[in-house]
Image: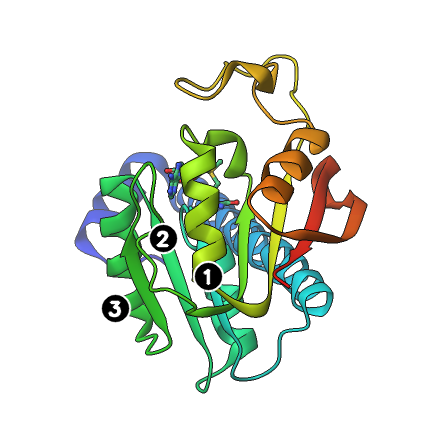
Amino acid sequence: MLTSPFAGSLTSLLGEGAMNVMMKRNLLLLGLACALGTTFAARVRGEAGEEVGRLAELMGWKAGTIVADIGAGDGKYTFAAAGRVGAAGRVYATEIDAKKLEELRNEVAKRKLANVIVVESKEVDTNLPAACCDAIFLRRVYHHLTKPVEFDANLVRSLKPGGRLAIIDFPPRAGLEPVEGVPSNRGGHGIPQKIVIEELSAAGLKVEKIVDDWPEDDYCVLFVKR
Ligand SMILES: C[S@@+](CC[C@H](N)C(=O)[O-])C[C@H]1O[C@@H](n2cnc3c(N)ncnc32)[C@H](O)[C@@H]1O
């Protein structure tokens, strides 16, 4: 039964049966859209959460571990990491892009995350304090670095002795635009694992583990600062 004055005039125009069918169909479409939205959000949360869980295990995070997510983007991995290390831990989320930085800061405030610190990164410098971190990870960021030699020296400086660095990345992929300003040896959008190992070994880190079956056809190279 339709009761509002607007519904009443439409009902007299279309007839009550047609109006009821139309409203039921609209409600059904609305329900479907909500369900799809919820499923998508859960999938995104779930995927980042699962990947961070795997990373936490690989890097030996505990409650209280201090982590940095370099080039945090929309913060999905930072927020999952913040949940893992808990109130006694800390996650530095760095970004070079001004808009992403602002969005990250807004999201951290909205979620009231006391254990996340957003840091503005520069082309050659993470801007992280020296020896601040037990673990640093770069997910799909290393191939964007335009000054890797200087940047790597800063990554190493920010690790505590015995700290670990994880590089999650992928070999150059066809169909992706080349990244502007990066060294010419990358060979396209992405970076061969061999170059990651050469550059971070030259910066003073030791390879601890190589994982080739990382999600979404990425690889993960784990380094340690001895
Ligand atoms: C492909 S996105 C990956 C974002 C996020 N790590 C993820 O996996 O969803 C690469 C990010 O690295 C950031 N970036 C590029 N160079 C950077 C630098 N030198 N320092 C910090 N962030 C950087 C970009 O702004 C961008 O947000």
State the separation of the CA atoms marked 3 and 2.
16 Å
Q: Name the side, left or right, on which 179 lies relative to 49.
A: left
Looking at the picture, does residue 38 appear above or below residue 67?
Answer: above
Q: Which residue is mark 3?
A: 109
Q: Given the image, on which type of amino acid does mark 2 rest?
A: Thr
Q: Are marks 1 and 2 in contact (CB under 8 Å)?
A: yes
Residue farthest along the left direction in this orientation: 5
Image quadrant occupied by the N terminus: bottom left
Among the 4 quarters of the image, the one containing residue 9: top left
Looking at the picture, does residue 151 appear above or below residue 51?
Answer: above
Residue at 56% x, 49% y: name it: 40
Q: Of callouts 3 and 2, which one flags the residue occurring earlier in the amino acid sequence?
A: 2
Label placed on residue 68 = 1
Residue at 64% x, 64% y: name it: 226
Ligand 1 is found in the corner quadrant, namely: top left
Q: Nearer the viewer, mark 1 or mark 3?
A: 1
Secondary structure state at the residue bearing disc 3? helix
